[in-house]
Amino acid sequence: MYACKVWLATTVNQHQYLSVKVPYKPAAVRAFYFALATVPALYFALSLAFNVDRQRTGVFLLARALDSTLDYNPILELDLILTRTLIFAQSCDGDSSAYTCALYAFYACEHALTLTFEPKLKQALEKLYHQLPAPDVAEESLKLWWQANGLNWAEKLRKVMVERRSIGYNCQFNEQQKKKLNQYYSANQLLVDCLNSDCSVSSEVRQKIEDKLFSFKL
């Protein structure tokens, strides 16, 4: 559990410094990366990958409750795209999903490249992008390619995410750990709901509460 705790604390707390570069509250950025870091571990399912792809509310919901201005930002969008692509790619199995997975990976990687400005990350993503078959080839060819190479490609993507964005760690939580993470999220959500309700707290107390939200101490 300790190794997973270190990973999660590093991921969430490290990315709070994005708030220096983006006009959002540090607590909102921490909430975003907590959701991003735990979604694959807690809800690793193909259905979630589709859900995350259709709408971003699952990851942005609590972060936006902390900072209503939190919306589109290329840095946050990039990390979300990379994470959902990894979830989708690792969740694919069987003949029925191979074709969809190959198409999804191609277009998601293409989109990620439009958001990437860091040279080494861009170079790594371009390399992954060019390994994927073009979407205009025969459907059967796409399926066969993904069945033979999909998981290996996904693992390469995960390594790029870890090295260049500090996300995508492969931490296997057991059921007890998942329960604790859910409890931690719920406790933070309760505090956020309180801050956004009619409860009367001073600005000083509000700031102290926000400073503690999703702030891991090892």
Image (spheres, rainbow, N blue to C red):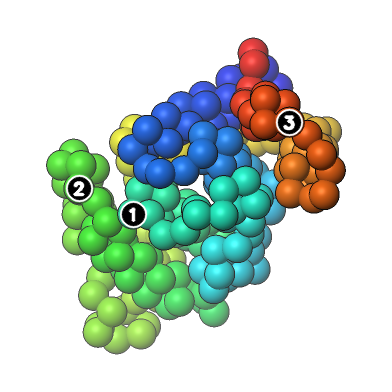
Residue 211 is labelled as: none
Which one is earlier in the sequence, the residue at label 3 or at label 2?
A: 2
Dot 3 surroundings within 10 Å: few (below 14), some, or many (20 or more)?
few
Please state which amino acid type lies under the numbered disc 3: Ser
Q: Secondary structure at mark 3?
A: loop
Please state which amino acid type lies under the numbered disc 1: Pro
Q: Which residue appears farthest toward the top when viewing the image? A: 218
Q: Which residue is mark 2?
A: 117
Foreground residue among 11 and 105: 11
Answer above or below: position of 181 versus 98: above
Q: Residue at x 58, y 29 (%)?
A: 8
Task: Pinpoint residue 19: horizontal percent, then vertical percent.
Answer: 42, 36
The quarter of the picture where the N terminus appears is top right
Answer above or below: position of 64 versus 162: below
In the image, taking residue 14 as reference, residue 128 lies left or right, namely: left
In the image, taking residue 74 as reference, residue 62 lies left or right, namely: right
Can residue 216 be seen here?
yes
Q: Which residue is mark 1?
A: 74
In the image, taking residue 117 as reference, residue 59 lies left or right, namely: right
Q: Which residue is mark 3?
A: 202
Which one is earlier in the sequence, the residue at label 1 or at label 2?
A: 1
